[in-house]
Image (tube, rainbow, N blue to C red):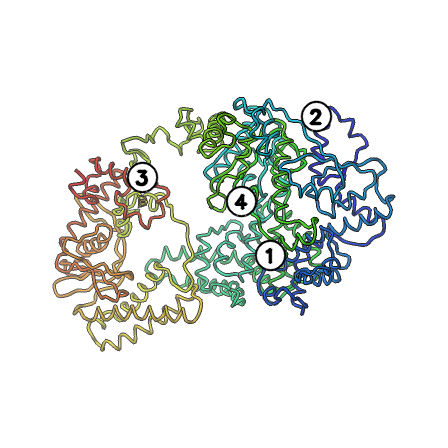
Amino acid sequence: MILRNEGIAHAWRRDLVSSSRADLLIGTRFVTPLSAASTILEMAGVSFTLGEESIRPARIAALFAEPLPFRSFDLGVLRSRPGWERAFASTIGDLEAARQSPTTLRSSTDLRCLDIAELWSRLDTVAGGSWTAARALIEAARLLAADPECWLFSGPCLTEVNGHETAAYAAFVTAVPAITFAHIELRPRRTVHAQRTRLLFGEVESTVLATCAQTERGLLAAFLFAPPDEIAASDRPRSAGIDDTVHFEEHAGIEEELDATVSWVISEVADRGTPLEQIGIVVPRIDPYASLLAHRFQCLGPDSVHTVGGAAATSGAGARLATILKALTSYLHIDEMCDVLPILELSNKEANVSRRDAIALLYELGTAGGSAVHPEGALDWAVRRTHREAAITAALADSSTEANVERQTWTLRCNLTLLGALDQPLAALDRAARTLIAGGTLQEQWRDLQHLGAHHVRLGGDGKRVLASIDAAIAPLIAANVLSGEAALEAILGTLEAMRLPVGRFGEPRVTIVSLTDAVGLSFQAVRVMGLAEGAVPSNIREDPVLPDTARTALGPMVRTSTDRTLGQLHALHRIVLTTSKRIVLSTSRMGADGGYREPSGVLIEAAAAVSRAPMGTNDIFIPDAQLMRRTAWEPGRAHLRQMRERWPIDARSSLVRASRGGGIPSSWRHDPLLPFARIPIGPSPSIADGWFPAGAFTELPGLSTERPISASALGQFLECPHRFLYERVLGWHPPPELVEEGTIDALSYGSLFHETAEQFYRSHGAAFCNKAQPLEFWQSLANEIADRRFEGFLESYPLVGSDVRAAQRARLRRDLRSLLETDWAIAKSFVDVERSFGPMELTIGGAPVHVRGFIDRIDTMGATTLVRDLKTGRAKPREKADDLRPSYDVQLGLYGLVTRAKAAEWGVPAAIQGSYVYPADPSGDERSFIDDFDDLATVTQQWIGTAIGMLQQRRFPRTPIEADCHFCSFKPVCGANARARARDLVASSEEVRAFAVMKLGEDEDE
Ligand code: SF4
């Protein structure tokens, strides 16, 4: 028997054994056409190697560089736009499989064909004995036609054909002596296809597979894609009711469809006893379904699925290798490097780099790496690592002079450890980048990458397999020695992305995941066809950009067009339905893997019409409309799925659904101390889920003890949203780190830079400046020097690329500092201190102790008062009127004033306080001032702090009832859309948080 692949051979063996005809296997050999053709050629002494398909694009790219005498294609476009080499390779592959040749193309009047003929003949010359599979079949067919004795076996031979085979395939099998063609009648019928089948194989008798019209599956097999008159025939059999042999499912998104697939497989095995190897999952394309499904099926065990080839790039090792390759193609740009660092194998095995650490560390190295316009930047990383390591070592030796020694030392030591651990991996990356920049050959670059992958990247269990597979796949390309530089690196990445890694084998007890066209020839008891959406099945018609359908049609019926591919998919679907023996599910999802909205495929309507559930078949209703599809297909499918899920919940969500329907809470949840179900009653009263925590053991909260003082910014956050405070300051959750836009400094870093620069100026010259010992211009020029020095230091640990960008940011720092000096110059005062630290210290507010700590930006004295100021680098927020008080914002200045008042004697300043926010970066020059009414601010600040501390003591962390507070919060998806409405009800009705409710909602609303 000649079969397309080993999987089909196994299906034949299994079906013969299960139908008690194992005797037929005695003496029967199963061969694939390519292995038979290769053996025939080798026996005839023909010298050749296979694999030319993978080298062709590279050869074509090299040929494009030559002055080809093209008459239709613009060589300039082909050279400058990527992808044309692959498009030409694909077209020539199609033409070769259709038994065209440069000679036949030259007889065409189409200029495109003449150009292709020219390129193809040059390709053949450079390829020599390197052949494609089609070429091997054609050459073997020639040998067989000339001498049938070359055939390997003496007995009769059988092969199944369907008319979708290539002319090269047909030439080979028709040359085999004593061959019989089996042809199964498939729908939809097309005259053109029947003619093509005759041309390929001659007159072949078609077999109509028997179907049983007693079941819905039988009806589906018998009437799928049948002509309208057969569908509408009054005397044809129709569904007698849902009998569990056919189900239709419509899902909201692909995630739901994937989960439903796992539930279905569990139900097949557990409820019906279907063996795993008799379950098939058919997908429109193997990517991304195979890897997504394989991941989902982990819940059934690591060996539960078999796929004829999941994308290697989506396996653990493949994805990591792809990350390294993409980083190298970007010349180790910082955007890619923050994904690379977490997967490197560090010299210190205990060290670990999260993405957050990676971003912080890369910023510290003060470079953005390389790019297409500046490849050499890729070599900065290793140099900067050494430089930074030395700088931190020196800083650690000197750290005793810093005010916040402990924390700084700890951070520096951590960074030093990571930098040391990155030494070897960064050196290996640097080597690979050097080879790339030097235009290294494919062999040289692959050698560096293999070393990197084997020793410095955490590739995981399948790392060796992925590396070995790529090594084998690119061996012909390396031997051809036609690629170097970026093209070589892209070829490795392209090979990885195109490579498939088979998982498991046919015959093993695993669920089979297979693409629609690869499923032809396989048979299962239960099949689920997924992804039946418009544009997927049948797939959108995509014309070949090199030789469109009109030009292909002119070359004869053997040259396949996009319409042939569409028909092939429909025939494949009908073939699967015919050979599924027990149950079939046809499913679709409204949203695809790309997040795009999709309509269900028309084949689902045809399938529903074939099954014809009531009321179809009456009142002239034969084809379901949207309403009928919902009633007769989607709703029964949903009910069936719901039952399956309730019987076999596969994940926490299904278990929750089951629990909510009274199906019981899993016992493992009830006994898990991290899931205190009894303590989370969701009802009208506030619960833990709302931030109301009961008495009992609890973590130490900020502000309640000397060991854990609270800062002004933490108080501000609590007053804005106690629940966010809970997430960030108590639970330690933080939004994922993000890289800032290139060419800017993020707000936090700029704020720190500005504060440090201002501190340096005032610490050295604050007293003299305030005494106006020199004119303003003098101080401004001094400030410029300090700003420049500080900015240079900042660049050591911040990736700001380009001299223009750096100059602009330096000018910004100078301008803001100058502006601060100008504002400051206008006020007569005596300098006291800058960045004055306080705490941990205890303030008594409302009779209760509050533990605080922090830094006050500026303290000066003005006669009998002390002026406390806070510098802000954002937009000015001047007070519109006297009662413009913002708890979450003004609590900071209020606290600083209260602390200064409490420490007045110790610090030697007047206890009468004035306060102000200063905005040097805002051109308006506005301030937010509490010069005349600081006492009012102090009074409300005490109330605000008292409210916050009271709630902390009671462990009440309600969500904010104010929508605007959530605008920039990353926890919006966690809280949900109805959070504010519920928070409003809870805080308004709870006596415990009454003061908070009044502060947020005002007296009236609270009542
Ligand atoms: S989304 Fe709103 S309610 Fe939820 S934590 Fe953030 S600020 Fe609070």
Identified by mark 3, the residue type is Asn
Q: Which residue is mark 1?
A: 545
Residue nearer the viewer, 91 or 10: 91
Between circles 2 and 3, the one closer to the viewer is 2
Q: Secondary structure at mark 4?
A: loop
Q: Which residue is mark 4?
A: 535
At 61% from the left and 52% from the top, the residue drawn is 496
Residue 960 appears in the picture as rendered: yes
In three-dimensional space, the C-alpha distance between marks 2 and 3, rounded to whole angstroms, equals 57 Å
Q: Position of residue 2 (x, y in %)?
A: 76, 39
Residue nearer the viewer, 606 or 434: 606
Q: Which residue is mark 3?
A: 978
What label sits on residue 934 in the rendered view?
none
Q: How many marks?
A: 4
Q: Dot 3: within a 10 Å radius of its alpha carbon, few (fewer than 14), some, or many (20 or more) residues?
A: few
Task: Please say if the residues under marks 4 and 1 sit with CB atoms less than 8 Å apart.
Answer: no
Sequence-earlier tag: 4 or 1:
4
Sequence-earlier tag: 3 or 4:
4
Q: Secondary structure at mark 3?
A: loop
Sequence-earlier tag: 2 or 4:
2
Residue nearer the viewer, 301 or 938: 301
Q: Quadrant of residue 760?
A: bottom left
Q: Which residue is mark 2?
A: 18
21 relative position to 797: left or right: right
